[in-house]
Image (cartoon, helix red, strand yellow):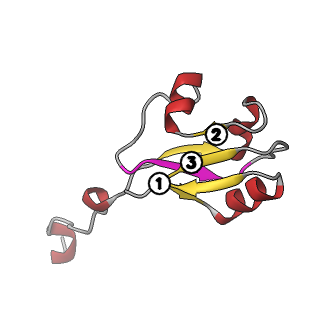
Amino acid sequence: MPLHRRVPKRGFSNAPFRREFTIINVSDLSRFDKGLKIGPEELIAAGIIKKLAKYGLRVLGDGKIDRPLTVTAHYFTESAREKITKAGGACEVISQ
């Protein structure tokens, strides 16, 4: 048996450095009435998310939104920010 097959394999794991977010999509925001201010507390109260992860809330741009909402989160993707502002809403970033 060659030496490189007998020696145990070791490698890099990114697990200790991984940043975990609670993720929602823009389409999840269509449940709310127009003109509301939506943050993590409102999403938990509505049952869209169960709890907030260590690094906060991340809004992804999957889906459509057709009403102006003020969304407060820790991170927005560019497509999510674009869709929310095109619908007449605003994006507010919560600092860590």
Q: Find the distance from the CA under tag 3 to the CA under tag 1.
A: 7 Å
- Residue type, mark 2 in image: Lys
Image coordinates for residue 62, horizontal then vertical, percent: 72, 50
- Residue type, mark 3 in image: Thr
Q: Earlier in the sequence, mark 2 or mark 3?
A: 2
Specify whether residue 78 is painted magenta.
Answer: no
The residue at which mark 3 appears reads as 72
Specify whether residue 61 is painted magenta.
Answer: yes
The residue at which mark 1 appears reads as 94
The residue at which mark 2 appears reads as 37
Q: Find the distance from the CA under tag 2 to the CA under tag 3.
A: 7 Å
Q: Earlier in the sequence, mark 2 or mark 1?
A: 2
Q: Which is nearer the eye, 55 or 11?
A: 55
Image coordinates for residue 14, horizontal then vertical, percent: 31, 63
* Region of the chain picked out in magenta, as a range: 55-62
Q: Residues within 10 Å of mark 1 (few under 14, many from 20)?
A: few
